[in-house]
Image (cartoon, helix red, strand yellow):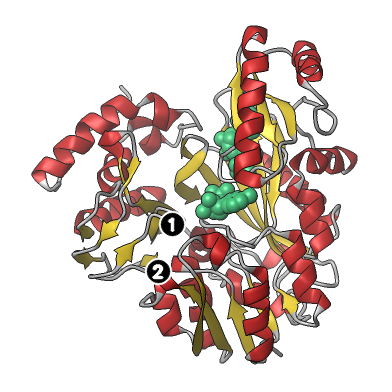
């Protein structure tokens, strides 16, 4: 059993992990940057150590500094959260090599899946369908043109090391290929230090549907149902819900089985997410596996009653899964809204600054995962996602109403946020019907921003508007 775990992250996810550790009676060690001296994760942990300057590369990405703290404080394991070092295979290897436990799969598994073009090949071998595309990474723009010609436009150029929606370009015509190829390469090099690209056929207007999986060290694997993460802007998730409102029982069953085939093919351990796109014709295709806890994991916790971080820790300690697939029961419906420090009406400009006021919603079946408080400073050095509002309802319509009233209650002053956009989104026709896809938010954006403005001026309250007519 672990007695002490280092949490190699910050913000809401570090707080989230520390909470479960406390409930399990496990001591925690937080690391923080000079910008995060007063942060909640540093306050909530049993011990906390400053490891460097505000830029992530000087602190939260400084593997040596984190390893030193872990070893000197007598930690037995490191939880990486999401982002930062969570999908860095060198870090996982380094942690395991010094005799600590990296809470997640092995470095080799992270490496194999983090190379997304390689993951495509592994999945094809495991009989999980992938979008038509290149076999492995592209050698040059000539090959990109040849592959696109063969599978047909439109295609997506994707960074093999990609994440967070970056390093991707939509190519609609061969004339644009060479320019976009170099653009994507440059963006991938800057963001990930790796410019390898691959090509996938664009699945038009798909739903993004993913399955939460758990795999123990003995190789037992279950999934905890699906999540619909199709309410996206720039290929980044904004609102997520579970279960997906439009999946048939049959589709859900075959996607769940594919997710298990996928994860069993790669010598997995711990919590992971198998992501698919679901085409309008009902076919679904694997896009990637995220080898970490996911931002939107709380909605799955709401409907299953399972603490996924607790399961991650139990599995890392060598514990077997306590549930079989048949034991997993999905109860009701859950939504998550990601509140970002940004100004939608000004092209979503990031909005760092000091939070003057923060009133968070509460009441029945509402969960807030956040690390902000009145007086805290939102730094431009880190992710703009500052609060997750998660609600549960017996029925989907109850959950939508509960989310609306939760956002009506939420007050964040001092910085700009996307609360208005989230609120208006919950009145969108396609959102209400559940028929939305990954393009819907962007195609309804003008209308949503129009009402978002009214929301800000009138300080909200009860207006029945429907966008997307
Ligand atoms: P999720 O499905 O959990 O939302 P995302 O892909 O949006 O997954 O990533 C979650 C977080 O991790 C975001 O803060 C994102 O910026 C960050 N992230 C994801 N992949 C990478 C990566 N390869 N490098 C750096 N940060 C990443
Ligand atoms: P990331 O690592 O940035 O999360 P993903 O491969 O998961 O990248 O893709 C991010 C988003 O881009 C998906 O949620 C989906 O909206 C869109 N996408 C990715 N691949 C395809 C595809 N082949 N066809 C259509 N949309 C796609
Ligand atoms: Mg993804």
Picture layout, residue 442 above or below residue 321:
above
The residue wearing badge 1 is 381
Query: Horizontal and vertical percent for residue 206?
Result: 57, 29
Mark seen at residue 104: none
Q: Tell which residue pokes out farthest to the top in this image.
A: 175
Locate the C terminus and report the quarter of the image it occupies: top left
Mark 2 to mark 1: distance in Å?
Answer: 9 Å
Q: In front: 217, or 141?
A: 141
Q: In front: 361, or 71?
A: 71
Q: Cβ–Cβ below 8 Å for labels 2 and 1?
A: yes
Q: Secondary structure at mark 2?
A: helix
Q: Earlier in the sequence, mark 2 or mark 1?
A: 2
Query: Horizontal and vertical percent for residue 213?
Result: 69, 59
Q: Tell which residue pokes out farthest to the left in this image.
A: 458
Residue depicted at 15% across the width and 45% down the height: 462
Residue depicted at 36% across the width and 38% down the height: 432
> For residue 369, what is the image quadrant?
bottom left
Locate the N terminus and report the quarter of the image it occupies: bottom right
Q: Residues within 10 Å of mark 1 (few under 14, many from 20)?
A: few
Query: Horizontal and vertical percent for residue 386?
Result: 37, 59
Q: In front: 208, or 41?
A: 41
Residue 223 appears in the picture as rendered:
yes
Specify whether 272 is left or right of 421.
right
Q: Is mark 2 within 8 Å of ligand 1?
A: no
Mark seen at residue 35: 2
Q: Secondary structure at mark 1?
A: loop
Picture layout, residue 45 above or below residue 63:
below
> For residue 54, what is the image quadrant?
bottom left
> For residue 141, what is the image quadrant?
top right
Specify whether 296 is left or right of 63.
left
Q: Residues within 10 Å of mark 2 (few under 14, many from 20)?
A: some
């Amino acid at each position: 059993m672990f007695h002490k775990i280092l949490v190699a992250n910050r913000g809401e996810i570090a707080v989230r992990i520390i909470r479960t550790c406390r409930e399990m009676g496990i001591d925690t060690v937080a690391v923080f940057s000079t910008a995060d001296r007063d942060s909640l994760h540093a306050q909530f942990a049993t011990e906390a150590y400053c490891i460097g300057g505000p830029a992530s590369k000087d602190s939260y990405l400084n593997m040596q500094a984190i390893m030193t703290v872990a070893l000197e404080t007598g930690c037995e394991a490191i939880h990486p959260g999401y982002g930062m070092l969570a999908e860095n295979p060198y870090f996982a290897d380094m942690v395991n090599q010094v005799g600590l436990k990296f809470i997640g799969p092995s470095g080799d598994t992270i490496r194999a899946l983090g190379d997304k073009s390689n993951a495509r090949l592994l999945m094809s071998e495991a009989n999980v369908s992938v979008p038509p595309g290149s076999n492995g990474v592209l050698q040059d723009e000539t090959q990109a043109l040849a592959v696109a010609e063969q599978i047909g436009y439109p295609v997506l150029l994707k960074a093999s090391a990609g994440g967070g929606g970056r390093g991707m370009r939509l190519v609609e015509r061969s004339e644009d290929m060479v320019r976009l190829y170099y653009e994507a390469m440059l963006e991938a090099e800057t963001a990930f230090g790796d410019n390898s690209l691959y090509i996938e056929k664009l699945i038009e207007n798909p739903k993004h549907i993913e399955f939460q999986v758990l795999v123990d060290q003995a190789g037992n694997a279950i999934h905890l149902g699906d999540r619909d993460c199709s309410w996206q802007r720039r290929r980044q998730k904004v609102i997520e819900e579970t279960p997906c409102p439009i999946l048939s029982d049959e589709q859900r069953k075959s996607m769940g089985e594919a997710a298990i085939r996928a994860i069993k093919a790669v010598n997995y351990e711990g919590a992971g997410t198998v992501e698919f796109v679901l085409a309008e014709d009902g076919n679904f295709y694997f896009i990637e596996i995220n080898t970490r806890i996911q931002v939107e994991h709380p909605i799955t916790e709401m409907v299953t009653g399972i603490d996924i971080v607790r399961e991650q820790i139990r599995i890392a300690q060598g514990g077997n899964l306590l549930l079989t697939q048949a034991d997993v029961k999905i109860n009701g419906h859950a939504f998550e809204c990601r509140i970002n420090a940004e100004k939608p009406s000004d092209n979503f400009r990031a909005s760092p600054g000091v939070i003057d006021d923060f009133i968070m919603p509460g009441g029945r079946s509402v969960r807030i995962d956040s690390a902000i408080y009145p007086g805290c400073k939102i730094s431009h050095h880190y992710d703009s996602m500052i609060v997750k509002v998660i609600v549960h309802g017996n029925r989907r319509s109850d959950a939508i109403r509960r989310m609306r009233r939760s956002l009506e209650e939420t007050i964040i002053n001092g910085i700009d946020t996307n609360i208005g956009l989230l609120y208006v989104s919950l009145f969108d026709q396609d959102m209400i019907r559940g028929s939305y896809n990954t393009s819907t938010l962007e195609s309804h954006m003008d209308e949503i921003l129009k009402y978002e403005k009214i929301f800000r001026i009138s300080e909200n309250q009860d207006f029945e508007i429907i966008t997307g007519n």
